[in-house]
Image (cartoon, grey):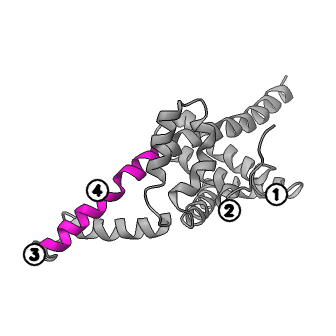
Amino acid sequence: MTETRTPLTFEKYQYGALAGYLASSDDESTKRFAASALEVLAGPKGFNLGEEAEGFVRGTQASDKGIQTAIGTYAGIFQEKRGEYKPSDLASWYAPVLSGLDDESKGKIDRELSKHDETLKDIEKKLQKSAYILDKKAPKGFHSNDAIESAKATRQKYAGVFTVMSTLDKYMFENLRVDAVDASRIEDLKNLASKL
């Protein structure tokens, strides 16, 4: 029997984040699915807009600017909402990409996600402050040696969890990509059939 779980608040926006992921690709054949990810966002796996989904999709896809605005908006909301969680809270979201992994490897990943009892938003603020201090463009002597060493330690402290999350995110978005490709497939084949 499969266990049901309460979705995390950011999951509602995951296809907006997927659209951003796809749109940022250097590969044109990948970029083309960004608009389809917005279609999925409007559908049952996202906002579940029902009949209103058509208006949402047409509105966002009316122009490249509309698509980019929608991507920026919903990918941003995804990041903002996800920032309210600790890395360990994301384990249930990452479960599909961790399935089939041996217990030892999965345990190591889970331990890395559980190392920090802080929200992603709090961790990211610390990393931004560290990046500012360590910025190569900062004038020499602008920050004390203690501040520089502390910034390096902060960066090192969180490097593992962000490496893990970056890899897991990549596979999560590739998992979600299937839905965007499927939405595009249906539309492309309908257009093809209408020309026959």
Which of the labelled discs sits on residue 55, or is there none?
1
**Disc 4 from disc 1: Cα separation:** 47 Å
Residue count near mark 2 (Cα–Cα under 10 Å), binned few <14, some 14–19, many ≥20: few
Q: Can you say whether 44 is above or below 86 in the image? A: above
Q: Secondary structure at mark 3?
A: loop
Of the residues shown, which amino acid type is indicated by label 3? Gly
**Disc 2 from disc 1: Cα separation:** 24 Å
Q: Secondary structure at mark 4?
A: helix
Mark 2 vs 1, N-terminal side:
2
Mark 4 vs 1, N-terminal side:
1
Asked where in the image residue 193 lies, by quadrant, the reply is top right
Magenta residues, dominant SS class: helix
| Residue name at image x 52 percent, y 46 percent | 169
Of the residues shown, which amino acid type is indicated by label 1? Gly
Q: Residue tagged by mark 3?
A: 141
Of the residues shown, which amino acid type is indicated by label 2? Thr
**Disc 4 from disc 3: Cα separation:** 22 Å
